[in-house]
Image (spheres, rainbow, N blue to C red):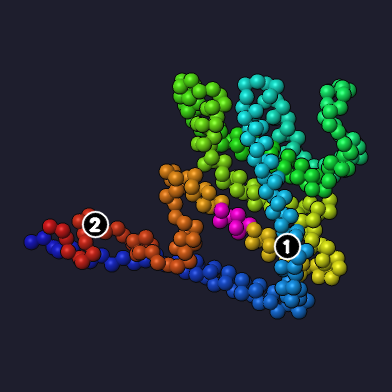
Amino acid sequence: MAEQPTTIKAVPVRHPWRWVFAVLIAIFIANAIWSIATQANFDWSVVGDYLFSSQIMHGARNTLVLTAIAMLIGVSLGVVFAVMWLSPNPLISGFSWFYIWIFRGTPVLVQLLFWFFIAAVYPHVSIGIPFGGPELIGGSSKNLISVWMAAILGFGLNEAAYMAEIVRAGIASVDEGQTEAAAALGMSRGQTMRRIILPQAMRVIIPPTGNETISMLKTTSIAAFIAFPELIYASQQVYARTYKTIEMLVVASIWYLFFTTILTICQYYIEKKYSRGSRAAAGENKLEYFAKRILPMRSPREEGGPPAPSGFNPGGHPHE
């Protein structure tokens, strides 16, 4: 008579060092919070008084508006320069390469200051017939290139160079057979790009574009160098009067963290939409990912226990 199989007792794998490091991290975080909360030289009442003040809210609004306009310019021009880069015409592709080389190779602060002080070199700007022909439209540079315009040009044109590389990488990720199939159907190059290539390239383009948007939100802080009334400049105006430097920087940081959190959530859902049908779409939610690693709710088999034999049920009796 065959011996009846016994119930397998799965023993979870122990991770003692995981808990040791978790306790150390918890102690470090608790100590940091306690130190900040009890610091006598830090005045939390100032943070509360100015967090929603009109001056700070005005700066936060300008930061969002500048970010949106700069990204709109950057994305639009980035697509144009990416398509130009891939053009078979050497003059068009060469101009795109030169633009990207210039704007990626120089610091954004230098470009910002360049546009702000452009009136020193070109006091009068105009549009007309080249090489000394009659002027059609013109005006003073000081009137045309305001602080707002300098910030928009500085950030928007710089972002276009980076977006061009992102879009070019997205286009290159689409199989060449798609282009050949579109050409076989009689589509022009422009139709193929709009209807076939770009929609498929969005899976590759969206994630870095979201990162660029978050980066742009924080990069706008250097516009304080040209007295643009954004969030950091508004904070500087306050602590120059109250001498509460750290407190006002905390106020600005709270707003930046709030905005970047909202953008991160939006980026996640946009990525999820464009990744439907791919392996990325089958991935677990970030909150689920975090919860699974904080809460040890996995089964013994997932913890490293031996797999159950074929035909074995949880009751300990073999299937007949």
Quadrant of the rendered structure where residue 99 is? top right
| Left or right of 298 on screen, residue 158 | right
Disc 2 from disc 1: Cα separation? 64 Å
| Left or right of 28 on screen, residue 49 | right
**Amino acid carrying mark 2 in the image:** Pro
Residue count near mark 2 (Cα–Cα under 10 Å), binned few <14, some 14–19, many ≥20: few
Span of residues in magenta: 260-266
Q: Secondary structure at mark 1?
A: helix
Rendered position, 203 above or below 27 = above
| Left or right of 29 on screen, residue 289 | left
| Left or right of 64 on screen, residue 127 | right
Which residue is farthest left? 1
Rendered position, 34 above or below 178 = below
Task: Name the residue rendered at 69%, 39% in the picture.
Answer: 160
Q: Position of residue 106 (x, y in %)?
A: 77, 40
**Amino acid carrying mark 1 in the image:** Met
The majority secondary structure of the magenta stretch comes to: helix
Q: Position of residue 298 (x, y in %)?
A: 38, 64
Q: Position of residue 233 (x, y in %)?
A: 80, 58
Q: Which residue is mark 1?
A: 57
Q: Which residue is mark 2?
A: 309
Quadrant of the rendered structure where residue 12 is? bottom left
Q: Position of residue 315 (x, y in %)?
A: 20, 66
Residue count near mark 1 (Cα–Cα under 10 Å), binned few <14, some 14–19, many ≥20: some
Task: Name the residue rendered at 49%, 49% in the picture.
Answer: 272
Closest to the camera, between mark 2 and mark 1, is 1
Say which of 291 and 197 sits in front.
Answer: 197
Kindly tell me whether residue 108 is visible in this rendering.
no
Q: Which mark is residue 199?
A: none
Task: Name the residue rendered at 70%, 46% in the picture.
Answer: 69
Q: Indicate the quadrant containing the C terminus: top left, top right, bottom left or bottom right.
A: bottom left
